[in-house]
Amino acid sequence: MEMEARVVTPPQVAEVPMIDAEVVQPMRVLAGLGWGAKRIGAELGIARSTVKRYIRDGVVSGIQVHLKQRKLDDDAKAKAVALFDSTAEGCGWARACTLVDCGNRFVVDLTGTFRTDRPVVVRGLADGNEFTCEADESTGFGREQPCSSSGIALENGRFYGESIVHAELMFRGVLCAVDLQVVQLDSVLAEASFAPEYDLVAPNGLACGPLCWVTMASLAPQG
């Protein structure tokens, strides 16, 4: 399967007076990942209006960028591939790049409504390789649950009441095809097949790296 590459790259913005570096760095990272002002403010415990001014005007200690999606021409694609396998030598704040979780990944949102007092099995094929993830209240609801493949993990995270569950299944790496079932007590709660189309993401700009292939999908188990 041929996957179309799209890239997120930053335009330049003007410099403005310095603000606290302890706020600058996480705000830069979250904005670089495409988070909105409301979400950043909630995460960092600061006013949304402050975040908006920061994103709009930028800061002195490293130019703040607002991510924007562009198609790559052949030359830019070649440069992106070369940068993907290289370190960010010469980048003024390359150390900050290492703080960004930018691994290749395909994430499936499994938010749905089903009984949380019964074991749940997520199983299927990832590029032809079988995998199984199991979770219940006693073995891991509320934290990452390992699966039968080291490249897959189930974050069966948060409860809303007694039956609404938000969970995420993460496949590390770049895949062409994923077949997925969510099963509880031999009943299939949901199933789907995916052919992921990845975005090439550069949260710190092409000159800094890191670069990674990322995409998401959703499936809503009901039981």
Image (tube, rainbow, N blue to C red):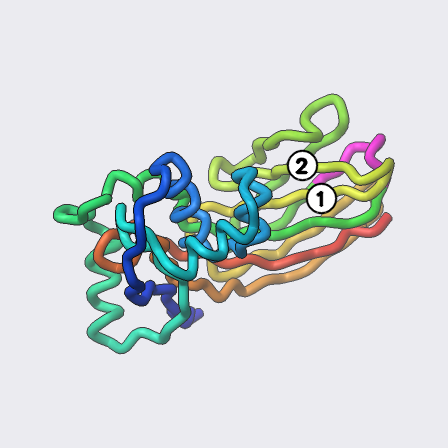
In the figure, 38 relative to 99: above or below?
below
CB contact under 8 Å: marks 1 and 2: yes
Q: Which secondary structure is most common in the magenta stretch?
A: loop
Helix, strand or loop status at disc 2:
strand
Amino acid on which disc 1 is placed:
His
146 lies above or below 109 = above
Q: Which residue is mark 1?
A: 166
Residue sitting at x 31%, y 39%: 98
Residue 66 quadrant = bottom left
* Rendering coords of residue 50 (x, y %): 49, 50
- Any part of residue 87 in sight: no
Which residues are drawn in magenta? Answer: 115-121
Q: Quadrant of residue 146?
A: top right
Foreground of the two, 201 or 61:
61
Helix, strand or loop at mark 1? strand
Q: Which mark is residue 157?
A: 2
